[in-house]
């Protein structure tokens, strides 16, 4: 549906600087509030002209218009799992928007999800595994295969050294108290299922999630 033509500003609510010499300064200032302008105009539900901002943006091309690739993804921030569209040009991400095809979010993103582009492109983003050796004073980069091998070695050694086969009275325990898991709210159902399955198979019994705590 084409949006309705942009209305003239409501009488008496035009933007003016607020100052000592302004006889209706407070009224003018309040009149600049977006909600007041919305309610005073002819779009009180804020679905059309009231949702636009000034500055001639109507004729500007969309920020996503010149993308050469659009990839569907999932918001990385929380377990709601809102759908996203990742717009990129020449191999670089240029914009992230909500995916209208997502049955969960239907094209919407909350403020966190809307800032995903900043998360992806932040110059301080870490892209390598960082490791500080015991008693070390400096961080060093590790390649992913080396880091995963080190994790496997530590998990196997911990399990072996902390394994409890039977208790004091000879009853079977078959568990380790040396390994625990604390999941975060960004994990979805499928990830939580797989983690529970993995840790239980290893004999761990201390398996929790931040969202439950
Ligand atoms: S952080 Fe916001 S946009 Fe992202 S999945 Fe959660 S609710 Fe959706």
Image (cartoon, grey):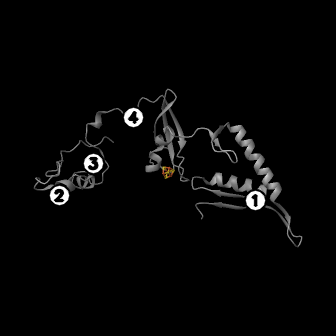
Would you say the residues marked 2 and 3 are in contact, meaning their CB atoms lie under 8 Å apart?
no
- Give me the C-alpha separation between circle 1 and circle 2: 64 Å
Mark 2 residue CB less than 8 A from any atom of ligand 1: no
Secondary element under disc 1, as helix, strand or loop, is strand
Which is closer to the viewer, label 3 or label 4?
4
Q: Nearer the viewer, residue 62 or 94?
A: 94
Residue 67 lies in quadrant: top left
Circle 2 residues within 10 Å: few <14, some 14–19, many ≥20: few
Which is closer to the viewer, label 1 or label 3?
1
Query: x%, y% of residue 130?
Result: 63, 42
Q: Which residue is disc 3 drawn over? A: 50
Circle 1 residues within 10 Å: few <14, some 14–19, many ≥20: some
Secondary element under disc 3, as helix, strand or loop, is helix
Q: Which residue is disc 1 drawn over? A: 178
The single residue placed furthest to the bottom in the displayed view is: 169
Query: x%, y% of residue 75?
Result: 52, 46
- Mark 3 or mark 4, earlier in chain: 3
- Mark 2 or mark 3, earlier in chain: 2
Query: Residue at (17%, 52%) from the top-left corner?
Result: 18
Which is closer to the viewer, label 4 or label 2?
2
Would you say the residues marked 1 and 4 are in contact, meaning their CB atoms lie under 8 Å apart?
no
Secondary element under disc 4, as helix, strand or loop, is loop
- Mark 1 or mark 2, earlier in chain: 2
Q: Which residue is disc 2 drawn over? A: 26
């Amino acid at each position: 549906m084409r949006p309705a033509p942009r209305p003239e500003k409501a009488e008496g609510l035009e933007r003016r600087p607020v100052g000592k010499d302004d006889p209706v300064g407070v009224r003018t200032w309040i009149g600049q509030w977006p909600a007041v302008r919305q309610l005073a105009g002819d779009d009180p539900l804020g679905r059309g002209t009231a949702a636009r901002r000034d500055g001639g943006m109507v004729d500007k091309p969309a920020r996503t218009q010149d993308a050469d690739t659009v990839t569907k993804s999932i918001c990385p921030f929380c377990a709601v799992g809102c759908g996203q569209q990742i717009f990129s040009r020449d191999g670089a991400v240029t914009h992230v928007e909500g995916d209208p095809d997502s049955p969960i979010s239907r094209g919407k993103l909350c403020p966190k999800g809307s800032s995903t582009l900043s998360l992806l492109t932040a110059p301080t983003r870490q892209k390598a595994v960082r490791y500080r050796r015991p008693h070390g004073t400096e961080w060093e980069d590790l390649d992913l295969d080396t880091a995963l091998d080190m994790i496997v070695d530590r998990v196997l050694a911990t399990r072996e050294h902390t394994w409890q086969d039977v208790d004091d009275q000879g009853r079977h325990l078959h568990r380790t108290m040396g390994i625990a898991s604390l999941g975060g709210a960004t994990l979805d159902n499928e990830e939580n299922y797989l983690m529970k399955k993995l840790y239980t198979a290893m004999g761990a019994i201390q398996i929790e999630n931040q969202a439950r705590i």
